[in-house]
Image: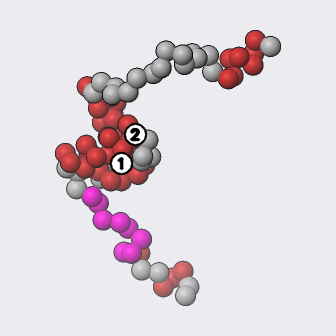
Amino acid sequence: MGLHKIDKTNLIEPRVKTTPQNVQEANEALFRAKMTLPAAAKHCGMTHKEMKLTFWEFLKYNEPDYEIPENTSEISGRQESRMH
């Protein structure tokens, strides 16, 4: 099959309608690192930039629901290696 015989209509995916439910699902999946930003944007029918802005708003108005243990070191591995 040559390149000239490819049906271009099959290459374009239909646009997903943005709904509050899709946006909520995508934001929660991003928060839990179960979805990448491109996948979340596609799930909602948004651009990457729109999804980033929406997720920043989600983070602004939703408190973390996890705790960081007190014995967790604040120094990353890279900073420790500079001290040696």
Label of residue 8 in the image: none
Q: Quadrant of residue 83?
A: top right
Q: Earlier in the sequence, mark 1 or mark 2?
A: 2
**Residue drawn at 75 percent across, 15 percent down:** 82
Picture mark count: 2
Question: Which stretch appears magenta?
Answer: 9-16
Q: Nearer the viewer, residue 78 or 71?
A: 71
**Residue drawn at 68 percent across, 17 percent down:** 79
Q: Which residue bears the numbered disc 2?
A: 32
Counting other residues with Cα less than 10 Å from the Cα at mark 2, is it few (<14), some (14-19), or many (20 or more)? few
Decide: is 59 above or below 49.
above
Q: Nearer the viewer, residue 46 or 40?
A: 40
Secondary structure, magenta segment, majority class = loop
Horizontal relation, residue 6 to residue 57: left or right: right
Counting other residues with Cα less than 10 Å from the Cα at mark 1, is it few (<14), some (14-19), or many (20 or more)? many
Q: Which residue bears the numbered disc 1?
A: 41
Q: Secondary structure at mark 2?
A: loop
Instruction: Please indicate, yes or no, whether residue 47 appears anywhere in the rendered image.
Output: no
Q: Nearer the viewer, residue 25 or 12?
A: 25
**Residue drawn at 36 percent across, 75 percent down:** 9
Give the x, y percent position of residue 37. 42, 44
| Colouring style | secondary structure
